[in-house]
Amino acid sequence: MKHTIKPVKRLSNFAVNYFFVSFFILAFLGQGLYQRAQAGEADSQAVRGPGKKRRAEATRKRAKAKTVTRKLVKGKTMKRSVKTDAIASVATLPGLGGTRVAAKSQRLKGAVYYLASGHGGPDPGAIGHYGKALLPEDEYAYDVTIRLARALMEYGATVYMIIRDPNDGIRNEKLLKLDHDEVTYPNQPIPLNQLARLRQCTDAINRLHRKHKGAYQRMITIHVDSRSAGQNIDVFFYHHQNSAVGKRLAQSIHRSFTAGYKRSQPGRNYLGTVSDRSALYVVRNSQAPTVFIELGNIRNEKDQRRFLLADNRQALANWICEGVRADYSSR
């Protein structure tokens, strides 16, 4: 029995010893693994930390970029708003099918102009001849008048085309086609009778004059004269004898023409004049101070060059506009 028991006892001691040794080894190894695990976690955090920072930084940058984008978009919107405000000051030019004219400045803001080209409708006015072609006064006077309307509107003026054509705007052709569809503001058929036509035109102006009571108002009527074919004349300006304001406007436009010819044709002696012609119906009866302009002799070959070339018609309109602006500035 003792012999049997001793080996079992020794085995038990060995097992106990093995158990304790294993425990300490495992504890040691466990401690190492735990420390390495902690170190690994720290390393992992160290790797992920900059990533988070980078992601956070990227997120901030994206947010900042969106903010900048929103600011830029707002800036664009503000710019569009400014443009829209500019477009709001654009007016429609009568006789051009709704063509809009943008104001370049507001130098004539508050000024009201009534523009009437001579004759129209069933009355073409004076007739010149260019070869076999007809040169009707009303068509050439109308083209200069509507060019003047555009020029005045570009400076912020309120402009009424008293004689208007529904389909003839600014034309650059040398020979302007004669038609009879002009009307008097706002849309009145023009009578053939001369007195009725002049009264209709003047009444339209005076109604508008009452509407704009208190405003700076001027009336300009543009014609082309008819004289002997051999008579070369310059541009003449007429006003009412009792209208100091009308005379001042006529003189201002006359000075503009004198300066214009001096620039464009230095050797030319400009002989246009300013005088009173109170007997003219429109000059006598228009409540707004009026200037009556004769652009030249439509039957004279040299004067015809003043009307036939579109650039010349534009120059006439520009020079009238310059005189009108100078008059408004000196009011």
Image (cartoon, grey):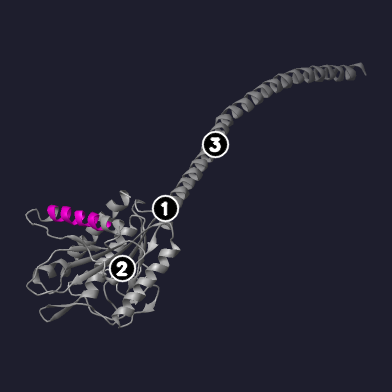
Measured in 3D between alpha carbons, the distance from the residue under mark 3 to the one under mark 1, in whole angstroms, is 34 Å
- In front: label 2 or label 3: 2
Q: Amino acid at mark 1?
A: Lys
- 89 with respect to 142 (left or right): right
Q: Is residue 116 left or right of residue 264?
A: right
Q: Amino acid at mark 2?
A: Arg
Q: Is residue 31 placed above or below 203 in the rendered structure?
A: above
Percent position of residue 201, x then y: 34, 73
- Residue span colored magenta: 249-262
* Residue receiving disc 2: 284
Image quarter for residue 42? top right
Q: Quadrant of residue 174?
A: bottom left
Tell me the tag on residue 83. Answer: 1
Q: Is residue 277 above or below residue 62?
A: below
Residue farthest to the front, as pictured: 242
State the separation of the CA atoms marked 2 and 1: 44 Å
Q: Which quadrant: the N terminus?
A: top right
Which of the two discs, 2 and 1, sits closer to the camera?
2
In the picture of the structure, the residue carrying the numbered disc 3 is: 60
Sequence-earlier tag: 3 or 1? 3
User: Which x, y percent locates residue 295?
Assistant: 19, 66
Closer-to-camera residue (142/89): 142
